[in-house]
Amino acid sequence: METISNIIGGVLTPSSSERSAPVFNPATGEQSAVLPLSTAAELDAAVAAAKLALPEWANMPPLKRARFMFRFKELLDANTDRIAAAISAEHGKTHADAVGEVQRGIEVVEFCCGIPHLLKGEFSRHVGPAIDTHTDRQPLGVVAGITPFNFPAMIPLWKAAPAIACGNAFILKPSERDPGVPMRLAELFIEAGLPEGIFNVVNGDKEAVDAILDHPDIQAIGFVGSTPIAEYIYGRGCSNGKRVQCFGGAKNHMIIMPDADMDQAVDALMGAGYGAAGERCMAISVAVPVGEKTADALMERRVPRVESLKIGPYTAGDDVDMGPLVTAAARDRVKGLVDGGVAQGAELAVDGRGFTMQGYENGFFVGGCLFDKVTTDMDIYKEEIFGPVLSVVRAKAYNDAVDMTMTNPYGNGTAIFTRDGDAARDFCDRINVGMVGVNVPIPVPLAYYTFGGWKASGFGDLNQHGPDGFRFYTRTKTVTSRWPSGVKEGAEFSIPTMK
Ligand code: NAD
């Protein structure tokens, strides 16, 4: 069985840790690899390698750094299927979904190919007598990314590509559940000719994360994962003086207005609720039909659709809509929450708890579940389920649906389905959620916009990728110079002004 190594200084480096975790194929339930959980000393070694490589990389003309990005992008294009297969084997998502994930990562790399333009500063001539001012965006130094299991290629790329393009050296601490995928990315960085030490991978768990949080030579940390861990990382990282951005969990509401195109809304809810078995931070987990008639029409159309979801292993290709959950623990947790929903009085219109599949009896599958008449005091409403479970919460009026979305602690994504431009505009203006869709169920912004949630879904003031990605991984220096230097004004003891 494969034992996964680290990548330190561009070299495959076996871990000497005495602790390890199993990696599974979620479709079969079989263990596929052993992941040593790296020690703080191994993180130190990665930081040392990054520091060694840093000066030359940080001082390289951005155009030359962009050329690495171009080569890396071409390699990602050529290896998309191979990376997607690695994702599906450890995460369980379908091949088409895994290909889409890689593509969303590639698009950020593509954006980073424009780094010379993106790093351009500002210049003002003649701010005073023979005085000019310009700004310069400089890299931070050694930076780290800590990433979740549900997008093992895309999110590491969202973190690493902008950081590296800006001239930083990067250390990735991937999820321990699907660590094989970032190793494929590391191989391609090496093949693209990236200098040794600029992209490092340190596998592990809390010990490696804490070592990152406390390391005096790590300047910034980008995290994506669940909200409790996001809060912890934000607090400890900031108190250690680092720049930190953390993206947390979600409970995304989709409001269906009485005038919505119901066929479109039902189609949208299928992919948004059950794609990747609901293991997406932008999945719709709460549908809020406005009015009883809308709710009844929605349920009538949804029940047969959820019952006929095609569930199976990624190896079945296009015959599958969704795969298993990532681990047995995730499956058991989701089933437990569904049990709780029934016990608390929600109507389970489609029950996927008993799903089994011949030949894959040990896989971590749960069938699609659909709850009706959920109320906001129930655990299935309050908890992020992160599984193929959709809760329908009936709202009497538009304002009730909006209030519910606004008082929910999470604020990652939301959507409204309507033909009413007034309602759509009001919703976009008022809603306190970071990413909003109008007749678009999963409004994930493209690479040249920024991605990030509000409230308990995001900590820190800058988003991921797009212009914020470059702001997060650089700091601004403002230079004021006088040429010719010999302009005589005499000694000045008060603060210079333009008065
Ligand atoms: P997680 O919080 O369990 O793990 C994320 C990372 O934190 C992993 O690298 C893990 O090793 C590390 N970690 C876990 N426990 C830790 C601890 N006690 N101390 C220090 N580090 C720890 O999240 P997950 O289960 O891998 O991913 C799913 C979660 O991520 C969901 O909540 C989902 O909504 C969220 N997510 C959010 C976004 C977003 O952009 N907002 C995107 C994807 C996923």
Image (cartoon, grey):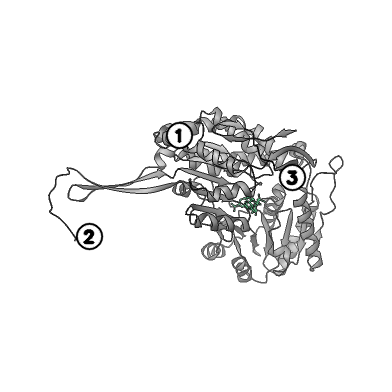
20 vs 309, nearest the viewer: 20
Alpha carbon separation for disc pair 2 and 3: 66 Å
Q: Earlier in the sequence, mark 3 or mark 1?
A: 1
Q: Amino acid at mark 2?
A: Ile
- Visible residue check, residue 93: no
Q: Is residue 401 above or below residue 124?
A: below
Q: Earlier in the sequence, mark 2 or mark 1?
A: 1
Disc ID at residue 495: 2
Disc ID at residue 321: 3
Residue at the disc numbered 1: 66
Q: Residues within 10 Å of mark 2 (few under 14, many from 20)?
A: few
Instruction: Classify mark 2 as within 8 Å of ligand 1 or not, answering yes or no.
Output: no
Q: Secondary structure at mark 1?
A: helix
Q: Residues within 10 Å of mark 3 (few under 14, many from 20)?
A: many
Q: Amino acid at mark 1?
A: Ala
Expressed as whole percent of the image width and height from the top left, the position of residue 112 reads 48, 39
The residue depicted at 78 percent of the width and 45 percent of the height is 311
Residue 408 picture quarter: bottom right
Expressed as whole percent of the image width and height from the top left, the position of residue 471 reads 44, 49
Disc ID at residue 171: none
Expressed as whole percent of the image width and height from the top left, the position of residue 221 reads 52, 49
Instruction: Classify mark 3 as within 8 Å of ligand 1 or not, answering yes or no.
Output: no
Q: Amino acid at mark 3?
A: Asp
Alpha carbon separation for disc pair 2 and 1: 42 Å
351 vs 129, nearest the viewer: 129
Relative to 380, is 77 on the left or the right? left
Q: Secondary structure at mark 2?
A: loop
Select label 2 or label 1 by which is in front.
2
Select label 3 or label 1 by which is in front.
1
Q: Quadrant of the N terminus?
A: top right
